[in-house]
Image (cartoon, grey):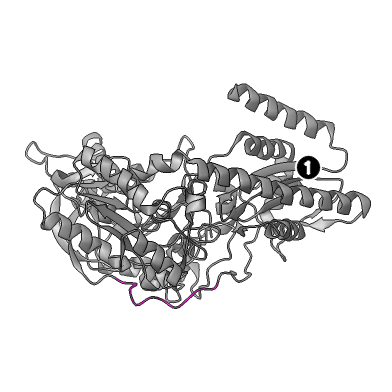
């Protein structure tokens, strides 16, 4: 079930209840125990392969550079379209690095100075705007040390700031070195957004130096909406600040987005031991589970293309590509069954852009050939879009800019752009019979695994009078799931939190951590876990107490339950 991996994760009522109840009861103890939080240095388990020869883009292509307060101007850039390795979860081990925090910032600022930049923005995203990203795209984590799945770093000549949401306030506070980094708790009343903060810096610089503020970005890892939002903010700051601007100075830019044509991502310049690109091979997602062939899906897409008068449809997110081509992958991103790739559909061709190694199996090659899918190198997607627009005066390219990076969407001239929800999004949302059956089957087998696990846990705690660590709980539960037919891997790192650990968002137990707890009848435990099966995905949250919970715990838990039932009904 790909939607679970790549839609922003919505907590269901049971998850909210269990997290909130434990947080209510244990909020004081969490404050103390979180102080000792450490990220495991245990090596990541997924085998990484050698970097592909197709890992950089050496082709020139037309790119629209948006300048704050000004008009769009076309420039030619040579950019590297970088493929990479495993995931962006806060629970993953810290990425290897030999530079100190100070050395990283000093090196980055040196690169910024060479390019005459006032600031450089480092987001969480990869070129596919994935929620969880391959390890080589964890630039923000490498630079700042913060490993949560949401957050953006901004570095200026004299500041380093990290924006993240309330899920990660505690974790970011622990992982950031406050001698060098400032935590910006987004969502709080007095904390400005990134765009407002940057535009404020731009107004200040223009007011004092009469010079444009230059913000550097890698356009492949920012959403298409970012430039518009940032430029609107520059304009607002220009109009509302105390800057003296004459009547004939409407074209003055107080701020400018610099896409750094022909330059690598600046973090990559200092990340000398950046992890290699994964070359995990695709596997076929058979018709018995997909319910529709590739040709049938393409037929539906082309019918909608005719209605919109589109000549090319571009699919940029990994779940869209996996769904379209009926392929899955294990290893590119931890616990996510997708592989690094793009896809396009025209009226006479279907193209999958990926590292050729990923399709080097007889079964996958035969499957894609049957679906009339042409294989091209990962980096060739830019040429495909450019050539389609340049060689077809009536070209209309359908791309969902909310699900596309700034670089690709900017290749398409406004007159050739159809910006709307793509055809695959509603197709994924409305399950066919085979997909529904796969969902049911995955929950049946997962339920059996959970039942076996619950029996083991109750027997261990109450009959054997043994305390068990959170790590052992994770391993045993995964073991029961692995016994089920069609099991591939867990659907996300298991959250097994005893006592106060249950209130830590996305907590993951690791051996040697000062946070590690053991379960006894005296404490509650929250377990949020799931499995990836060949035919479906599960996500189950449960809270247990094998002893006698305190009256305060029961009251808080019940109040939260009542509140959520009230909201839900």
Where residue 17 appears, as percent x and y from the top left, is: 67, 34
| Magenta residue span | 47-56
Label 1: how many Cα within 10 Å (few below 14, some 14–19, many 20+): some
Q: Which residue is at a point 51% across and 45% down the rendered structure image?
A: 435
Q: Is residue 188 left or right of residue 155?
A: right
Q: Which residue is mark 1?
A: 544
- For the point 70% across and 62% down, the residue is 513
Tell me if 455 is positioned left or right of 128 in this view: right
Judged by its main secondary structure, the magenta piece is loop
- In the image, residue 182 above or below residue 239: below
x, y (%) of residue 189?
47, 34
Quarter residue 125 falls in? bottom left
| Rendered view: 148 above or below 143 | above
Locate residue 48, reporting x and y percent: 50, 73
State the image quarter where residue 43 is shown: bottom right
Residue drawn where x is 18% and y is 41% of the image: 309
Quadrant location of the C terminus in the rendered image: top right
The reply to whether residue 15 is in sight is yes
Going by the image, does 298 lie left or right of 64?
Answer: right
Residue at horizontal 23 percent and vertical 68 percent from the top: 262
Q: Position of residue 481 (x, y in %)?
A: 69, 56
Instruction: Tell me, yes or no, if residue 31 can be seen here.
Output: no
Tell whether position 54 is magenta: yes
Element class at badge 1: strand
Asked whether 547 falls inside the magenta stretch, the response is no
């Amino acid at each position: 079930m790909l939607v679970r991996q790549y839609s922003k994760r919505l907590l269901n009522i049971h998850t909210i209840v269990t997290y909130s109840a434990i947080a209510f009861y244990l909020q004081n103890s969490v404050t103390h125990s979180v102080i000792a939080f450490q990220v495991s240095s245990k090596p990541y388990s997924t085998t990484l392969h050698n970097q592909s020869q197709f890992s950089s883009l050496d082709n020139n292509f037309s790119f629209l550079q948006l300048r704050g307060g000004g008009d769009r101007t076309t420039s030619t850039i040579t950019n590297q379209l970088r493929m990479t390795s495993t995931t962006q979860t806060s629970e993953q081990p810290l990425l290897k690095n030999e530079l100190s925090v100070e050395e990283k910032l000093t090196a980055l600022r040196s690169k910024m100075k060479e390019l005459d930049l006032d600031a450089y923005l480092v987001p969480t995203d990869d070129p596919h705007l994935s929620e969880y990203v391959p390890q080589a795209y964890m630039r923000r984590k490498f630079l700042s040390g913060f490993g949560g799945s949401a957050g953006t770093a901004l570095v200026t000549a004299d500041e380093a700031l990290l924006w993240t949401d309330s899920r990660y306030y505690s974790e970011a506070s622990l992982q950031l070195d406050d001698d060098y980094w400032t935590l910006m708790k987004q969502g709080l009343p007095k904390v400005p957004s990134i765009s407002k903060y940057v535009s404020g810096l731009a107004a200040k610089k223009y007011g004092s130096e009469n010079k444009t503020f230059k913000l550097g970005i890698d356009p492949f890892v920012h959403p298409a909406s970012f430039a518009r939002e940032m430029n609107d903010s520059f304009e607002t700051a220009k109009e509302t600040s105390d800057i003296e601007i004459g009547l004939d100075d409407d074209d003055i830019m107080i701020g400018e987005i610099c896409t750094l044509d022909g330059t690598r991502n600046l973090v990559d310049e200092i990340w000398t031991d950046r992890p290699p690109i994964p070359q995990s091979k695709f596997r076929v997602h058979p018709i018995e589970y997909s319910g529709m062939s590739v040709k049938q899906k393409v037929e539906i897409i082309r019918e909608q293309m005719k209605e919109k008068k589109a000549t090319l449809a571009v699919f940029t997110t990994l779940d869209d590509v996996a769904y379209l081509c009926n392929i899955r992958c294990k290893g590119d991103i931890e616990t996510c069954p997708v592989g690094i790739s793009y896809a396009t559909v025209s009226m006479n061709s279907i193209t999958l852009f990926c590292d050729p190694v990923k399709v080097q199996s007889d079964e996958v090659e035969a499957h894609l050939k049957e679906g009339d899918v042409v294989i091209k190198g990962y980096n060739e997607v830019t040429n495909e879009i450019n050539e389609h627009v340049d060689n077809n005066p009536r070209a209309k390219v359908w791309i969902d800019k909310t699900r596309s990076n700034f670089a690709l969407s900017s290749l398409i001239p406004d007159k050739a752009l159809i910006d709307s929800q793509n055809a695959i999004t509603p197709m994924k949302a409305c399950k066919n019979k085979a997909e529904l059956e796969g969902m049911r089957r995955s929950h049946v087998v997962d339920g059996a695994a959970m039942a076996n696990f619950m029996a083991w846990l109750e027997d261990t705690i109450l009959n054997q009078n043994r305390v068990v660590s959170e790590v052992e709980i994770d391993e045993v539960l995964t073991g029961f799931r692995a016994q089920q037919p069609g099991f591939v891997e867990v659907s996300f790192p298991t959250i097994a939190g005893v006592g106060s650990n249950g209130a830590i968002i996305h907590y993951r137990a690791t051996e040697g951590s000062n946070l590690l707890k053991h379960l006894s009848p005296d404490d509650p435990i929250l377990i949020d876990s799931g499995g990836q099966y060949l035919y479906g995905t599960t996500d189950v949250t449960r809270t247990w107490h094998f002893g006698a919970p305190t009256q305060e715990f029961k009251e808080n838990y019940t109040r939260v339950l009542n509140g959520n039932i009230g909201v839900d009904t």
